């Protein structure tokens, strides 16, 4: 199935025209922030003095996270693929990622609370194979994803409540193989999915949740695929049941 391909190609996203591979995986200034204040309640300009990180960056180890301390944006793509990472507090200043933002294969990461300043992702946002991730509450400031938004194979993720600020996904929305996902209430502000909507193999997610999501969209995606979720009988039946 398509989502299995996506799970194995975290850095080259293949999806209905989404996600040309960026060539700027590394780059940026060599300076790092020496400020050790990670209190998200008191973030000030002093905590975040470095502005934009030029280029892209990949986090493979916990020590890599500190390289981005103090930056408010990244012009290229950001990949967090760090099975041992537990702390993203050095990313508290980050408000935007210009390219793809891929959070993949993070076995120890339980939340994204340190991404509370993030408001936009210019291209694709992928959250996948992060097997300890229990919620997305840290993404509460995020309002838009420029191209595709993938939520794939996060087995203990129970809800999407942290996504309540998102109003638009420029191209495709895919929510697949999240074994503990019970509802889509966190997408209550979403009105636009530009191209394709794929919601499948979320084994305890009632199909009625998808119907309700379709009802709230102001325009119908050009392709809709809903399968392998929990069969249920909607009462009353929403107008947009697939």
Image (tube, rainbow, N blue to C red):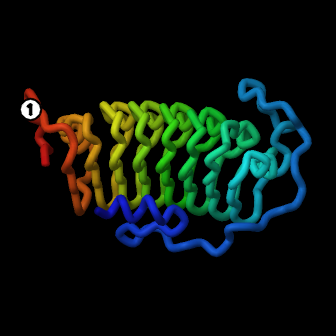
Q: Quadrant of residue 186?
A: top left
Which quadrant of the view contains residue 118?
Answer: top right
**Residue under the point 25% across and 40% down:** 203
84 to 113, vertically: above or below: below
Left-right relation of 46 to 191 = right
Q: Is residue 93 left or right of residue 201?
A: right
Instruction: State left or right for residue 227 relative to residue 18.
Output: left
Q: Residues within 10 Å of mark 1 (few under 14, many from 20)?
A: few
Tell me what residue is drawn at x 50 percent, y 73 percent: 20
Q: Position of residue 216 (x, y in %)?
A: 26, 40
Q: Position of residue 147 (x, y in %)?
A: 45, 61
Q: Secondary structure at mark 1?
A: loop
Residue at 8% x, 27% y: name it.
235
Closer to the camera in the image, 115 or 240: 115
Along the viewing direction, whichever of 225 and 129 lies nearer the viewer: 129
Give how far across and how far down residue 57 sits, in percent.
Answer: 70, 61
- Which residue does the image show at 72% across and 24% down from the upper left? 41
Horizontal side, residue 46 vs residue 161: left or right: right
Q: Which residue is mark 1?
A: 233
| Residue 228 pos. (x, y %) | 20, 47
Q: Tell me if residue 231 comes above or below residue 11 in the rendering.
A: above
Q: Can you say whether 16 is above or below 183 in the image?
A: below
């Amino acid at each position: 199935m398509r989502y299995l391909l996506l799970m194995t190609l975290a850095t080259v996203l293949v999806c209905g025209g989404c996600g040309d591979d960026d060539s700027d995986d590394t780059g940026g200034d060599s300076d790092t922030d020496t400020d050790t204040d990670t209190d998200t309640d008191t973030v000030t300009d002093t905590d975040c003095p470095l502005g934009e990180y030029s280029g892209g960056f990949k986090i493979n180890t916990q020590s890599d996270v500190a390289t981005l301390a103090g930056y408010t944006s990244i012009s290229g793509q950001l990949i967090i693929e760090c099975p041992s990472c537990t702390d993203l507090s050095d990313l508290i200043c980050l408000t935007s990622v210009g390219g793809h933002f891929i959070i993949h294969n993070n076995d120890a990461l339980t939340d994204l609370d340190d991404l509370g300043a993030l408001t936009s992702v210019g291209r694709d946002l992928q959250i996948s194979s992060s097997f300890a991730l229990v919620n997305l509450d840290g993404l509460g400031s995020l309002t838009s994803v420029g191209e595709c938004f993938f939520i794939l194979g996060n087995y203990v993720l129970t809800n999407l409540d942290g996504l309540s600020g998102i109003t638009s996904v420029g191209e495709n929305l895919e929510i697949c193989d999240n074994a503990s996902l019970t509802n889509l209430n966190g997408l209550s502000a979403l009105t636009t999915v530009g191209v394709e909507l794929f919601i499948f193999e979320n084994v305890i997610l009632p199909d009625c949740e998808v119907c309700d999501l379709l009802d709230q969209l102001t325009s119908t995606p050009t392709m809709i695929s809903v399968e392998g979720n929990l069969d249920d009988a909607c009462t009353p039946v929403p107008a947009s049941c697939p």
